[in-house]
């Protein structure tokens, strides 16, 4: 509950206004019910029992009756109808205004929470997504948020409205007749105990349902993403069976959850009916014995007030049940928001472009770096690399040798816990992430493009870039020609994930995006892996010009891409086995030469 109250705190003024509007709506509802006494007197004639009025409500009703009857019985009925119409209208107006206020609060709280969730998702380290299911993360934004809004925020609305209504109704019932109200209060705990028993296990069941829903989303996403493989291996029936099994279990759990939710309302309604029968019997006995001035007209009004109190009481029990259900989602959302995130704050210091003062001649340096994704399974072992400013370092080796891991550690996608990585002589562990990554440009092995125009994708790292700068970067990446041939040129939308482009075209746009940023350190992780031979040669010639005087780390399987690098580091099973220029390594006749010969045979 504290999580929800923190999110509601900014809207305290609106809650206060909502409370006031609900109070006014309930007051006019009670006024309508109390007026029934005068209606009965007008309709059947005054029934003066000779008993004096004992409370202000009775006196007010008698005064209203005395005023209405002076106009004659028929006219009084018409006037009374007008009064009832006005009272009902005011009740509905205030009820509507209260609903508008609570709707604004609910939608804005959900908006704020979604913003927080998205911000958190952007700031979580990649290591979190290595262990978390994608569907589980997506469920926080979709089903968990829907359940939270309906289960918790909606229940809070019902809870506050019901409590206000019940307090005002009970206060009026106590004022009308204490004995009859004490009888009611003695019966109410029975309803509360029964409903609490039903709702006790609801939160646990709801949490299990949400976990299963996350798994279902993960399976769906995984299946849609791997549809080509599923069809290729004739695994459609297997995928269908797996999905049906999870869907069947999920449906069974949801049915169990809804049985508990739905049981609260009819049970409380049944118990409320029992109490009404008790009131009719006990109240009739009090009227016949002339208890405390309780006239037959006031007793009818009393019964009407109690009947009007049953829906809020029913809503209250339902709200508690829904809250139990929604709390599971609130706990999941809160747990996600409490995950440890990366710090992105920029430091106050900014290095002046072109200034060499205080800058090391070595741009990047790795000192005795060891790294493991899983404890006990080393990926990098005692890596020592130095990249002088303005030079190109190439990392080569077989798959799984640790090449991309080194790039990830330099960008701090993962934290280096053993050893040290320096940028311009300073430990990257001491740099704010935003500052570090603003100085690095990355062309990743897996090309990611957005459902937007070509120009917007190239300018992703520099939203304010001019069209001339965008085109210049595209030319450098050998992408200008095919972009110009597209229907709307740079303003062409390339579809989801760049689906309208070939693999090579997507890669060249990704390279153009990195070049436009003009970073101090450029990391090319398999940048040419998706290009055909002709495009690769064209791009190599271009990159040769682009990389002159720039610090770059090039990761490649195709060794022709790295032949011109200032230094080539050969990795094998996380260790450096060879290093030198292309000519030196070929003369050495070791692992590098063997890889070159194998690719030449291919």
Image (tube, rainbow, N blue to C red):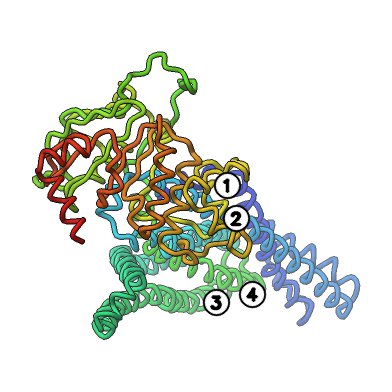
Query: Which numbered tag is attached to residue 490?
Result: 2
Task: Give the Cα distance between marks 4 and 1.
Answer: 89 Å
The kind of secondary structure element at disc 3 is helix
Determine crowd level at label 4: few under 14, some 14-19, many 20+ residues with C-alpha closer than 10 A: some
Task: Give the Cα distance between marks 1 and 2.
Answer: 8 Å
Residue 197 picture location, percent across and down: 31, 68
Instruction: Place residue 67 in its image quadrant.
Output: bottom right
Question: Depth check: 468 or 591 in front?
Answer: 591
Q: Earlier in the sequence, mark 1 or mark 2?
A: 1
**Which residue: 70% across, 72% down?**
37
Circle nearer the viewer, 2 or 4: 2
Task: Give the Cα distance between marks 2 and 4.
Answer: 83 Å
Pointer 4 residue: 296
Image position of 211 with respect to 106: above or below: below
Q: Are marks 1 and 2 in contact (CB under 8 Å)?
A: yes
Q: Earlier in the sequence, mark 4 or mark 1?
A: 4
Image position of 360 with respect to 158: above or below: above
**Which residue: 38% across, 38% down?**
522
Q: Earlier in the sequence, mark 2 or mark 4?
A: 4
Circle nearer the viewer, 2 or 3: 2
**Which residue: 13% across, 39% down?**
587
Residue 253 picture location, percent across and down: 30, 75
Instruction: Place residue 412 in its image quadrant.
Output: top left
Q: Are marks 2 and 3 in contact (CB under 8 Å)?
A: no
The answer to whether residue 167 is visible is no
The answer to whether residue 300 is visible is yes
Query: Which numbered tag is attached to residue 471?
Result: 1
In the rendered image, which quarter contains the C terminus?
bottom left
């Amino acid at each position: 509950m504290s999580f929800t109250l923190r999110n509601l705190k900014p809207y305290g003024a609106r809650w206060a206004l909502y409370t006031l509007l609900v109070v006014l709506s309930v007051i006019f509802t009670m006024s309508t019910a109390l007026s029934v006494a005068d209606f009965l007197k007008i309709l059947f004639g005054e029934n003066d029992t000779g008993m004096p009025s004992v409370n202000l409500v009775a006196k007010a009703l008698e005064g209203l009756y005395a005023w209405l009857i002076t106009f004659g019985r028929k006219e009084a009925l018409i006037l009374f109808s007008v009064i009832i119409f006005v009272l009902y209208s005011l009740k509905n107006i205030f009820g509507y205004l209260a609903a508008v206020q609570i709707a604004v609060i609910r939608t804005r709280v959900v908006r704020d929470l979604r913003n927080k969730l998205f911000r958190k998702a952007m700031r979580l380290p990649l290591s979190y997504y290595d262990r978390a299911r994608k569907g589980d993360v997506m469920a926080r934004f979709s089903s968990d948020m829907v359940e939270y809004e309906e289960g918790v925020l909606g229940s809070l609305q019902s809870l506050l409205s019901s409590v206000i209504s019940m307090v005002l109704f009970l206060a009026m019932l106590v004022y009308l007749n204490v004995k009859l109200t004490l009888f009611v209060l003695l019966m109410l705990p029975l309803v509360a105990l029964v409903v609490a028993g039903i709702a006790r296990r609801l939160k646990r069941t709801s949490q299990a349902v949400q976990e299963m829903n996350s798994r279902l989303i993960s399976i769906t996403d995984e299946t849609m993403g791997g549809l080509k493989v599923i069809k290729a291996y004739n695994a459609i029936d297997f995928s269908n069976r797996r999905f049906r099994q999870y869907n069947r279990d999920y449906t069974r759990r949801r049915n169990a959850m809804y049985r508990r939710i739905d049981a609260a309302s009819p049970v409380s309604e049944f118990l409320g009916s029992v109490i009404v029968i008790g009131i009719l019997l006990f109240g009739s006995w009090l009227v016949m014995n002339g208890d405390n001035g309780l006239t037959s007209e006031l007793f009818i009004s009393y019964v009407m007030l109690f009947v009007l109190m049953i829906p809020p009481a029913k809503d209250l029990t339902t709200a508690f049940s829904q809250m139990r259900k929604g709390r599971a989602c609130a706990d999941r959302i809160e747990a996600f928001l409490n995950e440890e995130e990366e710090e992105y704050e920029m430091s106050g210091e900014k290095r002046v472009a072109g200034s060499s003062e205080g800058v090391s001649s070595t741009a990047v340096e790795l000192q005795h770096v060891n790294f493991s994704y899983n404890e006990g399974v080393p990926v990098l072992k005692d890596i020592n690399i130095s990249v002088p400013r303005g030079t190109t370092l190439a990392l080569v080796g077989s798959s799984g040798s640790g090449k991309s891991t080194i790039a990830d550690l330099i960008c701090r996608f993962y934290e280096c816990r053993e050893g040290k990585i320096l940028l311009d002589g300073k430990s990257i562990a001491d740099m704010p992430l935003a500052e570090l990554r603003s100085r690095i440009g990355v062309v990743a092995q897996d090309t990611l493009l957005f459902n937007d125009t070509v120009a917007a994708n190239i300018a992703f790292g520099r939203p304010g870039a001019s069209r001339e700068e965008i085109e210049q970067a595209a030319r450098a990446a050998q992408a200008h020609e095919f972009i110009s041939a597209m229907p709307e040129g740079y303003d062409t939308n390339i579809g989801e994930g760049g689906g309208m482009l070939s693999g090579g075209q997507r890669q060249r746009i990704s390279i153009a995006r990195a070049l436009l940023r003009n970073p101090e350190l450029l990391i090319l992780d398999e940048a040419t892996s998706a290009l055909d031979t002709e495009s690769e040669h064209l791009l190599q010639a271009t990159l040769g010009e682009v990389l002159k005087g720039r610090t770059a780390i090039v990761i490649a399987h195709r060794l022709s891409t790295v032949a011109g690098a200032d230094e080539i580091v050969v990795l094998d099973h996380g260790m450096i086995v060879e290093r030198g220029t292309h000519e030196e390594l070929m003369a050495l006749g070791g692992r590098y030469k063997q890889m070159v010969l194998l690719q030449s045979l291919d």
